[in-house]
């Protein structure tokens, strides 16, 4: 499983069902729940349209490594 503990890393998050994407910056550690790879802010989740789903499958691509 991919994990990142380097703050400032730019990541493109793609919601796999719809193809919607957003670019975020890693600013915290976690998630600490098995099987999850990223926790998004409510604002990022709203832009992806996944707030009501709560959990969904996403793809990640590192865009910038500080």
Image (cartoon, grey):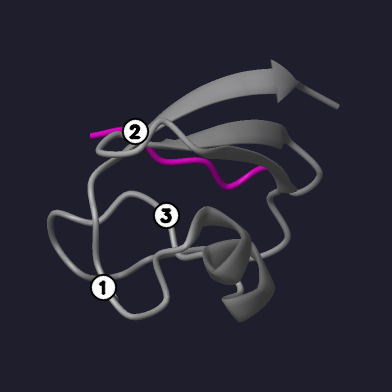
Which numbered marker is on residue 20? Answer: none
Residue annotated with mark 3: 38
Majority SS type along the magenta span: loop
Secondary structure under the numbered disc 2 in the rendered image: loop
The residue lying at 52 percent from left, 55 percent from top is 48
Q: Position of residue 64 (x, y in %)?
A: 78, 21
Of residues 6 and 53, the one nearer the viewer is 53
Magenta residues, start to end = 1-6
Of residues 35 and 43, the one nearer the viewer is 43
Q: Tell which tag, 1 or 3, sits nearer the viewer.
A: 1
Residue annotated with mark 2: 2
Give the answer, above or below, for where 33 lies relative to 16.
Answer: below
- Is 60 left, or right, of 66 in this rendering? left
**Is residue 62 shown in magenta?**
no
**Is residue 3 shown in magenta?**
yes
Q: CA distance from mark 3 to mark 2?
A: 9 Å
Q: Position of residue 26 (x, y in %)?
A: 68, 51
Q: Position of residue 24 (x, y in %)?
A: 71, 47
Q: CA distance from mark 2 to mark 1?
A: 22 Å
Secondary structure under the numbered disc 1 in the rendered image: loop
Count of numbered badges drawn on the protein: 3
The residue lying at 23 percent from left, 34 percent from top is 1
Q: Position of residue 63 (x, y in %)?
A: 71, 19
Tag 1 or tag 2, which sits nearer the N-term? Answer: 2
Which numbered marker is on residue 53? Answer: 1
């Amino acid at each position: 499983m991919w994990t990142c503990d380097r703050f400032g890393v730019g990541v493109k998050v793609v919601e796999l069902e719809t193809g919607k994407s957003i670019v975020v910056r890693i600013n915290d550690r976690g998630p600490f729940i098995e099987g999850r790879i990223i926790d998004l802010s409510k604002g990022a989740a709203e832009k992806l349209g996944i707030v009501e789903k709560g959990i969904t499958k996403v793809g990640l691509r590192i865009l910038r490594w500080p």
